[in-house]
Image (cartoon, rainbow, N blue to C red):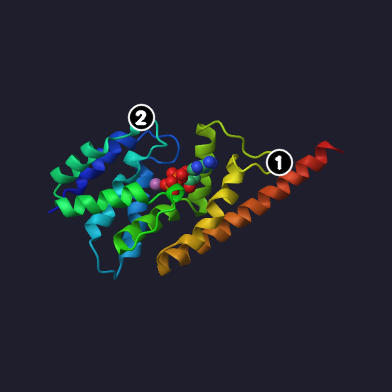
Amino acid sequence: MIRFDRLEELVKKYLEKEPTGHDYLHALRVCNNAKELLVGIKCDHSVVLAACLVHDLIDHKLDPQFKMDLNDLNKELESVGFSCDQIKMIEDIITNMSFSKKGRFDYIEGQITQDSDRLDALGAIGIARTFAFGGAHKRQIYDMNLNLETSVGHFYDKLFLLSDLMNTEEGKKEALKRTLFMKEFIEKLSKEINYSTFRKSE
Ligand code: ADP
Ligand code: NI
């Protein structure tokens, strides 16, 4: 019997106040996405749910106060009931799933965890997280050179590419819906930006 309640508490302790969109509630949403994608799929559901919960605890982008050492995390996973093999799989997933690593998994547990995290980068919540991240990292909302380093630039640099990278059928379906919504948002935003530029030069 795995003590998910204790794992959740651990993630809450570290990430509750994380300000860049990699917080405790992100971990819970990724878990909920996984629960949807796992329906009818035969694999180790516990590994997927644990990987979703803890995946950002070791993210190099996070401030040190929110981060855990991988060995300490593995000890926690053991203490809540995971076997050695399960811990190895969770470690493989969370160290290789990020967009920047361009990791691809050849087993379903990794594929579902990766899709579940990517879904939370898309849609309305994806938009909210992008501007939260941008603000926390003191980035511009946009600039006039279509710079990819701005928050709006991030849609072109990464977010609009994600739906093509989804591993599962269901994940891809949801990713396409969320991407469509983001494209509508960016289209509206672009119109407003042009409008105010026009007004200024009047
Ligand atoms: P991954 O877990 O695939 O490596 P990240 O942790 O880099 O993904 O990104 C998670 C979310 O943080 C992104 O989907 C986005 O909302 C936000 N984010 C990351 N990098 C940027 C950026 N350069 N500008 C704006 N938002 C970003
Ligand atoms: Ni994440």
Establish whether ligand 1 lies closer than 8 Å to the Cβ of label 1: no
How far across and how far down the image is residue 189, in percent?
66, 48
From the viewer's perspective, tell me whether residue 6 is left or right of residue 156: left
- SS at badge 1: loop
Q: Residues within 10 Å of mark 2 (few under 14, many from 20)?
A: few
x then y, percent, for residue 195:
77, 45
- Residue lying furthest top: 65
Number of callouts in the render? 2
Residue 34: x %, y % from top left: 34, 58
Q: Which residue is mark 1?
A: 145
Residue plotted at (26% across, 51% down): 90
Does the closest atom of ligand 1 sit within 8 Å of the Cβ of label 2?
no
Relative to 156, is 115 on the left or the right?
left
Q: Label 1 amino acid?
A: Asn
Q: Is residue 27 above or below residue 36?
A: above
Sequence-first tag of 1 and 2? 2
Q: Quadrant of the N terminus?
A: bottom left
Element type at mark 2: helix
